[in-house]
Image (cartoon, rainbow, N blue to C red):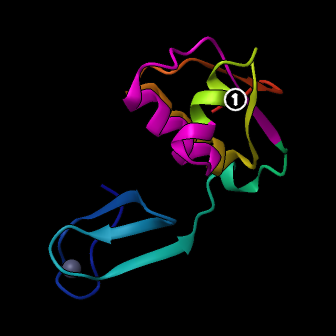
Amino acid sequence: MLEQCEVCGARLEYRIKESLQGLFCMQCDWSVVTTYIPQIYQDLTQYKMYLCCTSSHNVEQLKAISTVANINLIQARKISQEDQPLILEGKAPQISEARKIFDSLFVTYTIKPQFPY
Ligand SMILES: [Zn+2]
């Protein structure tokens, strides 16, 4: 679409691949790349994640809480009985990972300040 590969002459395609962006050859390994840092990694905001009403009887959800908060299951059960406990404090990528875990298990939460990703 833009240019041809210097090595094999095949078409080059613009892509973002992991943390790199640039032109990649569709046929060989040739590429011109620049380092691409996603917005989320440049965000220096310290986010706080609070748990909303979660059933303390759902073992899968308790496991998710213990993973995210780095606590054991007994502590997770205890914390899930509190009113909107603070479960995690961290930068955007960390919050994003936690959100994936919680979303897959329907654990409800709120993030402050508002999480734009
Ligand atoms: Zn090529």
- The quarter holding residue 57 reads top left
Q: Residue at x 46, y 66 (%)?
A: 22
The answer to if 55 sits in the magenta stretch is yes
- The answer to if 5 sits in the magenta stretch is no
> Which residue occupies 23% across, 88% down?
7
**Looking at the picture, does residue 91 appear above or below residue 3?**
above
- Residue 90 horizontal/vertical position (percent): 76, 48
Q: For this view, does 100 lie left or right of residue 110? A: left
* In front of the other: 98 or 31: 98
Q: Secondary structure at mark 1?
A: loop
Q: Is residue 97 visible?
A: no
Mark 1 Cβ inside 8 Å of ligand 1: no
Q: Nearer the viewer, residue 17 or 115?
A: 115
Disc 1: which residue: 116
CA neighbours of label 1 inside 10 A, class few (<14), some (14 to 19), many (20+): few
Q: Position of residue 68 (x, y in %)?
A: 58, 44
Q: For ligand 1, which image quadrant applies?
A: bottom left
**Total marks in image:** 1
- Residue extending farthest front: 74
Rendered residue at 36%/78% (across/down): 31
Where does the image place residue 33, in percent across and percent down from the top left?
Answer: 48, 74
Q: Nearer the viewer, residue 20 or 32?
A: 20
The kind of residue on which mark 1 rests is: Pro
Q: Which residues are magenta?
A: 47-75
Rendered position, 107 above or below 63: above
Query: Vertical placement of 67 versus 101: above or below?
Result: below
Residue that extends furthest to the top in the rendered view of this protein:
53
- Residue 104, percent from left and from top: 38, 29
Q: Quadrant of residue 74?
A: top right
- Can residue 54 be seen at all in this image of the molecule? yes
Instruction: Tell me which residue sits at (75%, 25%) in the image.
Output: 85
